[in-house]
Image (tube, rainbow, N blue to C red):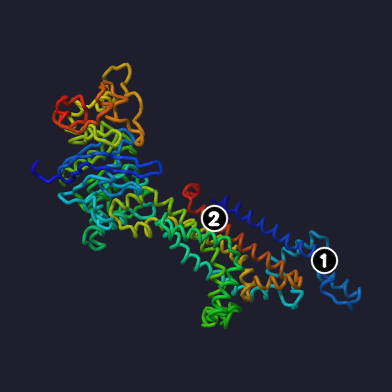
Amino acid sequence: MIVFLIKRLANAAFVMLVVALMAFMIFRFVGDPVQLMVNEQTTQAERDELRERLGLNQSMPMQYLHFVTNAVQGDFGISYRNQQEVMSLIAERFPATIELVLMATIISLVVGVPLGVITAIHRGKWYSEGLQFLSIIGVSLPSFVIGIMLILVFSVMFNILPAFGRGDVVSIGWWTTGLLTPSGRAALILPSIALSFYQITLVMRLVRAEMLEVLRSDFIKFARARGVPAWRVHYSHALRNCLMPVVTMTAMNIGSLIAFALITETVFQWPGMGLLFIQAVTFVDIPVMAAYLCIVSFIFVALNTLVDITYALIDPRLRNAKA
Amino acid sequence: MTQTPTLDVRALRVEFPGRHGTVTALADISLTIQPGEILGVVGESGAGKSMTGLAVQGLLEPPGHVAGGEVWLNGRRIDQLSDREMEKVRGREIGAIFQDPLTSLNPLFSVGKQLVETIRLHLPLNRAEARIRAIELLAEVGIPGPDIRVDHFPHQFSGGMRQRVVIALALAARPKLIIADEPTTALDVSIQAQITSLLRRLCKDNGTAVMLVTHDMGVIAETADRVAVMYAGRLVEIGPVADVIARPSHPYTRGLMGSIPTLGARVPRLQQIDGAMPRLDAIPQGCAFNPRCPQVMPRCRIERPHLLPSGSGHSACWLNQPAQESAA
């Protein structure tokens, strides 16, 4: 178990190093940072001094080492665009994205799980097949289309929900939340629905497949033979046995939701990390881009590693190996 | 025989409509089980033994359904009940034991929880009373330390112990009928004897009727009072177990008995029935057994024999029926 843990963590660290290398390379490929930072009037001496100060005259591996050690300490340098610490910029935007992603996850579970159960139990009925068909549309519709359509219907046609922004927010320490104000909650509805759409269909299809598998098992037949009512067989006995993969998939997908949020945030002008990244791209604000890449990758890798370790804990063979 | 039988199945027919026409899985099944009686049901795989049990419980997998006949339980007709009404019959009036104890229990719930669930579904007990009853049941089926074991999960029990738990679950509401589908097939031989004697004891003590489905003639000989032999979805012979074993009147039963090894008897080679059971969608005209029957007559290929009295039981074979009777 210990060996497995070390292996898995080393694996994760290696992936992060590669990601950091890629983030670091952006600086090289996009052009000379000094050129980007200075204006026309800067003298050569000033340029050299800046180059010296930024450590750009060092060798490549040294610079990379520097980048990594700084990144580990949460220092991603200074934004080219507004001369702020990149880390504080991201920290400011982080709560918005996380609230959006968590809300979308909750929606996808609350809607997706019952739909999956229903389509599994009533397989072959017209409404079940209809939902299956709709879920294909859900999977294939790009989230920006869904977002724009939601805005069109609820903001433009009926004018009941805000189309952009985050509404009023309340600060709790460094965290800002929109959940405590009416306008903040209203603003959260459309973006989280748009973001959860794909996830709902994913959860629904997974639950359906798992349910069909579990419903065939003997203990379900035996539960029915014991006289357990149908709804209880389905929602207590069968569903419980399906939740394991659903939970793992949901945990792992939080990473991709953060990545997907980029598009949703752009459509709804949601002030999260994704929007920050898009703005950074438009202004060639490389430190912000690099930091975004590193942080999103870190969340991805951390979640995956966590899931792997949890699996190992649950697998009795590994559990026995430890004892 | 003035008593109402616990189970009375009359001319039961089960069909599976499919893409290539309807398959008749069971035809003309008639049998009764008296209170406290154990009826063994034997036959090859696919003969319809388990299907008969499932049909009685209303647990046929769709699109399979009862297409004809009647099922009476304690003088009440149950084959036409709605799903909701059947839920109250299952567990309460019919207990079930499945073949594989390793997969019959929900792995995520403790055995106590599954027992309490079943007890409370059928009996007006509160949680604490149901738990006491659950412990009593575990003790009754011979599980040591039932007050501790009640909180254990299925994977903490051995196969034989799990089958005891399954039996406890089947007995939870003191049903009048237990349908045991291959209850010993998945167990070691030494455990098999324990389970069958437990089943027999519980049945005799409580006056419970048992339908014991198995392909093992040895289990039948030890446990059952009467035996029904099935072939290709039909009953071929039914009668007291000693008579059927000693004087089988249907050639198929004779073949079945001949293929059982006997200790001490020096035979160069076990007898076997040539050929295989026909597929249910390709049952030959006349007697279903006629292509494999060593005593086949021309009539067997044309007319299907019905279950008629023969000796102390009933059999479906033209050999046992005088020609003039069939003309009627």
Q: Amino acid at mark 1?
A: Gly
Q: Amino acid at mark 2?
A: Ile
The residue at the point 20 percent across, 31 percent down is: B315
- In the rendered picture of this protein, how many numbered marks are placed on residues? 2
Q: Is residue B131 visible?
A: no
Q: Is residue B303 visible?
A: yes
Are the residues under badges 1 and 2 in a single subunit? yes
Question: What residue did someone put label 2 on?
Answer: A309
Q: Nearer the viewer, residue A269 or B190?
A: A269
The residue at the point 63 percent across, 68 percent down is: A263
Q: Is residue B180 left or right of residue B281?
A: left
* Other-residue count near label 2 (Cα within 10 Å), few / some / many at <14 / 14–19 / ≥20: some
Report helix, strand or loop for mark 2. helix
Quarter where residue A151 is shown: bottom right
The chain to which mark 2 is attached is A
The chain to which mark 1 is attached is A
Q: Position of residue A39 (x, y in %)?
A: 86, 77
